[in-house]
Image (cartoon, rainbow, N blue to C red):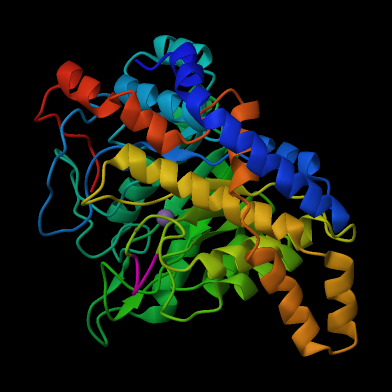
């Protein structure tokens, strides 16, 4: 399905236009002292992981409208991510969810990953649902539960995820905790935190020394009065309690409306505790829309903080694990993911164009307008030729969505997997 040669053939009619636009932008940027090929190189190097649960349709808790051709197994999920990566060269890893993605044949899986040029990015535990044959329920929480036996079951599940991660070479174990309460007085707020910290410590101890635990926060949903880890401050304090291998994970949709997320990013970078990122688009809450679809300026400002921190010699170099965490109710999931990666690369490219020395000077001299104009100038630059050039240099498609459609990928997937195939996920 969609060979490299086909991708190159489908690029042909777009090539002339692309070269004209890329050349023009290269000359324009050179006048400002920016080397376009350097920016492209950084875009080629940038990778964002694809979660196994974003490959099928999902979206709301009310209804699901399957599109057909959804991956039916872990092997087919890996095939889909490999296809995305061949189209854009920017998605060379996949995140797994346990128990949705329990590997049956580890050596065969490792071989498939090698042949596809992919790695496993992270393992994600699931204590937000009860699984079949599970002795205890998570109705009243998992790692924070008042009952020792329930907490123990949740700890064991997380340790099992760590073990699968070790087998598959994953270097990250991500914990998102759905625990919380729906009514005032339901939960002792301090004790719930304390129990969670202790449970996390048991999981932390089971991790190998080269694995990182990412702790994700979320202010509400599925609980609506309180969540045990509602904000970055709580995640940060848990990381401090656990040790250096624990890091905060920022999910763009896990904030109350109008939260200044770029400031949170800056703070966590300053503290050396920003370990991971979940990209998605948000209008009201955890909407899981296409990244960059509603607030592209915010996405740019977040990348501006990341690039600023990366270029700051005084800060310790710490890798941030980037992943898309979205859901798709009305779009073809693969097209949605291609759009998301494109928005992410575009925001990154724009952040790389910011004249940092001039911005620093404007900030130091309190020149408000100049500082703002410097950011706007970078944000308003049309960087699409840079992103397309990065795709081209990685052997991908100049326009991944167009090539995906021209190659009739979904039609082929439906033919192979059927009209009614359903992928695991929410
Ligand atoms: Mn997330």
Q: Quadrant of residue 377?
A: bottom right
Q: Quadrant of residue 333?
A: top left
What residue appears at the point 76 percent right and 73 percent down from the top-left corner?
A: 374
What residue appears at the point 20 percent right and 50 percent down from the top-left corner?
A: 136
The N terminus - image quarter: top left
Question: Quadrant for ligand 1?
Answer: bottom left
Residue 53 shows up from this direction = no
Residue 178 shows up from this direction = yes
Residue 425 at x, y percent in the picture: 25, 43
Residue 166 at x, y percent in the picture: 52, 27
Q: In the displayed structure, would residue 53 be above or below residue 108?
A: below
Q: In the displayed structure, would residue 326 be above or below residue 411?
A: below
Q: Quadrant of residue 157?
A: top left
Would residue 77 be counted in the magenta stretch? no
Q: Main secondary structure of the magenta part?
A: loop
Residue 394 at x, y percent in the picture: 62, 26
Disc tally is 0
- Please state if 124 lies on the left or on the right of 352 as rendered: left
Frontmost residue, 277 versus 19: 19
Frontmost residue, 203 versus 365: 365
Frontmost residue, 321 versus 226: 321
- Please state if 245 lies on the left or on the right of 329 as rendered: right
- Please state if 82 lies on the left or on the right of 89 as rendered: left
Residue 360 at x, y percent in the picture: 86, 74
Q: Which residues are magenta?
A: 282-286
What residue appears at the point 45 percent right and 49 percent down from the top-left corner?
A: 340
What residue appears at the point 14 percent right and 40 percent down from the top-left corner?
A: 66
Frontmost residue, 225 versus 372: 372
């Amino acid at each position: 399905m969609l060979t490299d040669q086909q991708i190159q053939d489908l690029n042909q009619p777009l090539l002339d236009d692309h070269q004209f636009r890329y050349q023009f932008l290269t000359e324009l940027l050179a006048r400002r002292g920016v080397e376009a090929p350097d920016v492209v190189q950084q875009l080629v190097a940038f990778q964002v992981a694809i979660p196994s649960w974003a490959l099928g349709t999902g979206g709301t808790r009310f209804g699901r409208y399957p599109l057909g051709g959804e991956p039916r197994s872990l092997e087919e999920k890996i095939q889909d991510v490999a296809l995305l990566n061949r189209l854009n060269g920017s998605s060379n890893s996949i995140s797994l969810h346990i128990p949705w993605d329990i590997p049956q044949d580890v050596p065969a899986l490792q071989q498939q990953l090698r042949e596809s040029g992919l790695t496993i990015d992270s393992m994600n535990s699931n204590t937000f649902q009860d699984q079949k044959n599970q002795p205890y329920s998570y109705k009243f929480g998992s790692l924070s539960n008042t009952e020792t036996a329930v907490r123990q079951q949740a700890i064991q599940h997380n340790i099992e995820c760590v073990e699968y991660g070790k087998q598959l070479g994953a270097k990250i174990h991500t914990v998102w905790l759905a625990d919380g309460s729906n009514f005032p007085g339901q939960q002792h707020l301090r004790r719930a935190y304390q129990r969670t910290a202790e449970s996390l410590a048991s999981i932390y101890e089971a991790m190998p020394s080269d694995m990182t635990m990412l702790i994700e926060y979320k202010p509400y949903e599925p609980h609506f009065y309180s969540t045990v880890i509602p904000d970055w401050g709580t995640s940060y304090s848990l990381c401090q309690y656990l040790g250096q291998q624990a890091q905060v994970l920022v999910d763009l949709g896990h904030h109350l409306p109008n939260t200044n997320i770029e400031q949170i990013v800056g703070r966590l970078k300053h503290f050396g505790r920003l370990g991971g990122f979940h990209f998605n688009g948000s209008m009201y809450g955890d909407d899981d829309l296409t990244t960059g679809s509603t607030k592209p300026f915010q996405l740019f400002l977040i990348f501006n903080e990341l690039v600023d921190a990366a270029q700051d010699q005084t800060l310790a170099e710490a890798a941030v694990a980037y992943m898309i965490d979205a859901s798709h109710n009305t779009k073809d999931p693969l097209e949605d993911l291609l759009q998301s990666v494109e928005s992410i690369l575009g925001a990154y490219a724009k952040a790389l164009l910011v004249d940092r020395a001039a911005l620093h000077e404007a900030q130091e001299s309190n020149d408000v307008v100049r500082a703002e104009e410097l950011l706007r100038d970078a944000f308003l630059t049309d960087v699409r030729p840079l992103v397309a050039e990065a795709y081209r240099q990685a052997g991908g498609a100049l326009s991944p969505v167009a090539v995906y459609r021209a190659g009739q990928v979904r039609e082929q997937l439906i033919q192979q997997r059927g009209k009614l195939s359903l992928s695991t996920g929410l």
